[in-house]
Image: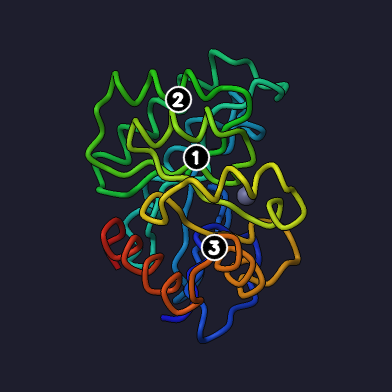
Amino acid sequence: MDFIDIHTHATKQCPEILSIINIYPNNTVPKNNPFSIGIHPWYITENNLQLDFKNVEQKLYAKNCLAIGECGLDKLSKTNYNLQISVFKKLILLSEKYNKPLIIHCVKAFNDIIHLKKEYKPQQQWIIHGFNKNKQIANDLIKNNIIISIGASFLRNEKLQNTIKEIPVENIFLETDDSNEPIKNIYNKFAQIKEKDLSIVKQKITENFNRIFIV
Ligand SMILES: [Zn+2]
């Protein structure tokens, strides 16, 4: 596989790209394409929760389900924060039960994520998607064995580029999320920032993928 897009909402696929399409509990499972499924903190509604969990758990059995997510904590969301935590905790347990890594949406809640990681000591890899924060937060995440996935936002953000320079490629994934930026451009820019050949970056990210995901 040439390029790996760890988190996308796009359904159009390309043969040289392995992408994990994110779906929501009531979405149809993609036929062959790898996907992740989770309950996003923005879309938690108490009335639907039971059905959402039922849907998630059922769809986790699909062969092409590679991860649980996106899910997580968002302090800027209107969803009650305690409710977000209780949903996230249940998804952590599902991640462990079904051996699926977690793809995490995190806004202003990095301390809580790290705290939960210490509390649950998960076997499954946790991946913070859409990372665009500073060096200190990146270091805290890495120290706690959380992988950082970065997307289009670093292309035009010099501060983030400087942070990325110091993160070992072993701790990184790349993603398109909901941007229109092709994953190839993200790989190219990343290789340029890391001052590495594109082929080396491809190889290292693929190694990360093979270490963490069961395909
Ligand atoms: Zn997303």
Real-space Cα separation, disc 3 to disc 1, in angstroms: 14 Å
The answer to the question of whether label 1 and label 2 lie on touching residues, with beta carbons closer than 8 A, is: yes
Of labels 3 and 1, the one closer to you: 1
Circle 3 residues within 10 Å: few <14, some 14–19, many ≥20: many
Residue to which mark 2 is pinned: 113
Real-space Cα separation, disc 1 to disc 2, in angstroms: 9 Å
Residue located 37% across and 67% down the image: 204
Circle 1 residues within 10 Å: few <14, some 14–19, many ≥20: many
Residue located 50% across and 39% down the image: 104
Q: Secondary structure at mark 2?
A: helix
Identify which amino acid the numbered label 3 is placed on.
Ile
Residue to which mark 3 is pinned: 21
- Percent of width and height locating residue 184: 61, 75
- Percent of width and height locating residue 65: 39, 60
Instruction: Give left or right: position of 42 versus 95.
Output: right
Identify which amino acid the numbered label 2 is placed on.
Ile
Q: Residue furthest front?
A: 195
Real-space Cα separation, disc 2 to disc 3, in angstroms: 23 Å
Answer yes or no: is residue 89 visible. yes
